[in-house]
Amino acid sequence: MNARILNIIFAVGSSLILISSVLVMENVAWGKFCFAVGTIFFAFCRIKMAYKGDDFRLKRLNRFYFFSVLFLATSSYLQFKGYHFWVVLLLLVAITEFYASVRTSYYEKEIASKKKSPSTSDSLHSDSSLKE
């Protein structure tokens, strides 16, 4: 599937989750259903955009995304059952998503800089050998 389409579905799902969580708090009946649809969109995109490389740290952070989806699905279930504990799970989703996204970005930049540094260090060594 096209990455642009996945990003649009992800944005729609996230927006539905955000808007419908307020609607559920205001006791709007159809807010639960919008939250469930947003959860399905969000989970679909997380599954499709999963990390498939061999870096252990990024695999671990991908598991954080998986737990975030589980918390979100459980939160949706609790809404339909009438429990108010879903808000705590939604807070856990926000915390895990924030942590995983910040760390993923940091590690990806670190990996990219490691790939660039050997070629620049080789050119520095060759320049220094010319000066000697």
Image: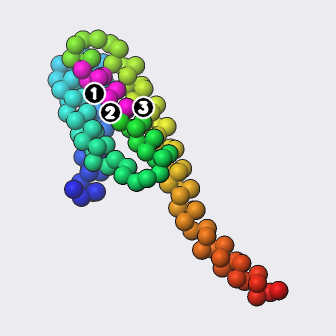
Residue 75: image x %, image y %?
A: 30, 22
Q: Which residue is mark 3?
A: 94
How many residues crowd around disc 2 within 10 Å: few (fewer than 14), some, or many (20 or more)?
many
User: What's the amino acid at mark 1?
Assistant: Ala
Which residue is located at x 70 percent, y 82 percent? 126
User: What's the amino acid at mark 2?
Assistant: Val
In terms of secondary structure, where does tag 3 sit? helix
Q: Which residue is mark 1?
A: 73
In terms of secondary structure, where does tag 1 sit? helix
Q: Is residue 103 magenta?
A: no
Colouring mode (rainbow / by chain / secondary structure / one colour)? rainbow
CB of mark 1 within 8 Å of CB of mark 2?
yes
Which residue is located at x 24 percent, y 46 percent? 9
User: What's the amino acid at mark 3?
Assistant: Ala
* Quadrant where the image shows the N terminus: bottom left
Q: Earlier in the sequence, mark 3 or mark 2?
A: 2
Q: Is residue 130 above or below residue 125?
A: below
Left or right, 35 with respect to 89, comes to left
Q: Is residue 128 above or below residue 103?
A: below
How many residues crowd around disc 3 within 10 Å: few (fewer than 14), some, or many (20 or more)?
some
Mark carried by residue 69: 2
CB of mark 3 within 8 Å of CB of mark 2?
no
Please indicate, yes or no, whether residue 11 appears anywhere in the rendered image.
Answer: no
Q: Is residue 69 magenta?
A: yes
Residue 49: image x %, image y %?
A: 32, 49
Q: Is residue 61 above or below residue 84?
A: below
Which residue is located at x 76 percent, y 84 percent? 129
Q: Which residues are magenta?
A: 67-77
- The span from disc 1 to disc 2 (Cα, nearest Å) is 6 Å
- The span from disc 3 to disc 2 (Cα, nearest Å) is 11 Å
Residue 23, by quadrant, is: top left
